Image (spheres, coloured by chain):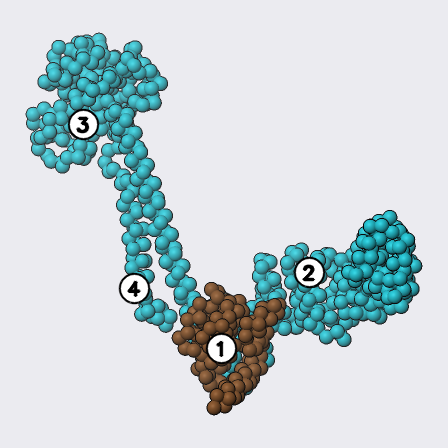
Amino acid sequence: MSAIFIFSNGDKNRFLRVSFTLILFLSSFSLFPQKKSGTTNVFPNVHLKHIVLPHETFTTIGQLYGIRGEDIAEYNNLEYYDEEVIPKYVTIPLSKQNFSKEKRVFSNELLVPLYYIRGNAKTLFRLKKNGPNKMVRRVNGRILLAGYLHTTKVDQKVFQIASPGTPEPTAIVGYSKRKDTVSNTKQKDKFSLASNQQTTPVATVIKNKANFLSKGAPLITRLPEKKEAFAEVIEPQPRSVSRVQKVLFLVKVQLSISIFLVALIFLYTAIRNRKEILNAKLNGSIRKVLIDEILGGNSFSGRINKALSTSLFLKKQLSKKANRQFIIDEIINGRKSIKGEVGDNFLKLYLALNLDKDSANKLKSKNWNNVVKGIQELAIMEQNHKMTEIFREINSKNEFIRMEAQSALLRLSGFGGLWFLNVLNYPISEWQQVKLLSILATSPVSDIPDLRLLLDSPNQSLVIFTLKLIGLFKQRTMHNEVVKALGNKSEAIRFFAVKCLKEIHNEYTASVLIRRFATETRRNKIAIVKVIGEIGDQGQTDFLLDVLSLGDDTFRILAATALSKQGIKGNYLLEEYCDKIGGQYSEILLHTKSAV
Amino acid sequence: MVMLIAEDDPLISMTLETFFTKEGYKVISTNNGREAMLKIEEHLPDIILTDVMMPFYSGLEIIAKIKSGFNKKIIVVVLSAMGQESAVKEAFELGADDYVTKPFSLAELSLRVKRLVKVRGRNTVLQLDEKF
């Protein structure tokens, strides 16, 4: 049903956008260079040049060079035909089929050595780098053996055969400078077909090549008089052209990748947007059904069960985990925002749809996020019967799970949940203490349990939390236990005990604190003077005068402030003291009086 | 009576819309401050229920515009969350008529709205009498 809805309401622009993206995506592939079919040259820029003789066809030429006629036609961008070749010359690729760098002869093959003639200016290194690399070896000074042409049919007019058993040929009989580049380049390197040095070169000379040979290549003079050779090797193309091609290729590749990535981003965005729109529509429908159920009326539970058995839409949505989670989130949101009868209906719907099982299952998850979410859901939806499962997590190794479990226990059972504090293995952080106290602030004070045991806990943070709890909820019955805490070894516990006593003080508190003053740390002494100032009466004036006479300015100001709070007697004593010491300092102390 | 609800939480917004529609109000629902401003000018509602925190314009900005602008007689009830006491105080200073804190009871909210409508109606009649 939803699919029909999607397409019937399809946005035209969105459709066009998706189509455009797909076209872009597919077109990006066309920019990738296509792999050339047929022959792949061993040396990308080196070819043999064959001057076409009358009546020669691609097939006959191919037989001479150990390659198919179709490959020659394709390599020269010509259409293959089985008749006399029309162009004056064709280039012959040196491929794996017809060329090798090593002298390996198969039974029905003949080898024709190919030589590269090194120019004056070129070092062996530069040749290896820029020319037909991996030259086999130096043969004679500037002449380097490049490799062997494999062929099965040899025209004696063309080649001196280098078949197995014949002496190694070394003489140069051809050369390689292209006619159109000879005049404007200083490069003298050449590829040549070889013939036997030991005998007079037999055939091997290009027909009508006089003009070609007369351009001043150094080896021309060594060519035989009989100019009948018909094949030559074309040397590598100028380096600059090759570099331009490389750059162009790289630009093409980068452009293709960029277009591909842009297309991919478009496609991803389109899919994601479509998914979001679908989800929003679906969520809206679910939400509408939920609200109809929530605001239904008195026969609520019955109606939900009926809806579950009849509404295919709701059933279908509940079968999907993501939708169930969406419903849980919505119900929890509703529960947090709306109270009263409607708020209770959210809880009933949660139970009627068995969503409590989903929340409980999250506690079994290995992902701490899920565990925390599950605990939160159970606590907000007041699932008290799941307290045992939640309790297991209060000493979790994960701090977040631990904190959430502690908070959940207090949410579910108020002060009654404090029993878990006894079994805590980890300290309660300051933040967690604030959080727990804020949760407890909404619980009825009459439910506060006996906190004595907690004050004896070896867990320092727990004792501090208990002292805060006693102070916040004014647990005056705990006064004596808090006074005992003043003797604790921990300075922090003693500090919070002093602060706690301020909240639950009685007529003995001030004298107890004064007795502790002499042995306390500076921080706790300051706290005691402050508390005396708040809770003391005229009976503590002597103590405050003693503090006033201490050398420490902080104590002096605190004592002066405390004295000014002690009624007429305190103010009188303060003024008397100031008159006695006189000067500017007395004015400062008197200023505290006006500040109070 | 025309009621405008400005609430960015879709569930709360839809719940309020459904509830008050059943109560007999003509309800216009918006989910952000900008849309709310436009709808207020377009429909001139009698009652506005507005959240404090919303995209584009806050509930306080909406109240400021209504109360200082074209129609001071519109009843404005603020829906605030826990811990937004200062915002509630500011809303009253700007001229809001009432507020409820989340979680709120729909029944209670309905009663508050009815009471405000009643009081406003009485004041209007009194003002008319004074003119005559």
Count neighbours of disc 3 (C-alpha within 10 A) and say few if under 14, some if 14 to 19, many if 20 or more: some
Task: Identify the residue at horizontal 67%, vertical 65% (top origin).
Answer: A407
The residue indicated by pointer 2 is: A432
Indicate the position of residue A33 as horizontal and vertical percent values: 28, 40
The Cα–Cα distance between marks 4 and 2, rounded to whole angstroms, is 54 Å
Could one spot residue A343 in this view of the protein?
Answer: no
Q: Colour of chain B?
A: brown
Q: Amino acid at mark 3?
A: Thr
Residue closer to the observer: A324 or B85: B85
Label for residue A385?
A: none
Say yes or no: labels 4 and 1 on the same chain: no
The Cα–Cα distance between marks 1 and 2, rounded to whole angstroms, is 46 Å
Q: Earlier in the sequence, mark 4 or mark 2?
A: 4
Total marks drawn? Answer: 4
Residue closer to the observer: A324 or B41: B41
The residue indicated by pointer 1 is: B72
Chain coloured cyan in the rendered structure: A
Q: Compared with residue A126, is residue A334 higher up or lower down, i.e. above or below?
A: below
Asked where in the image residue A148 lies, by quadrant, the reply is top left
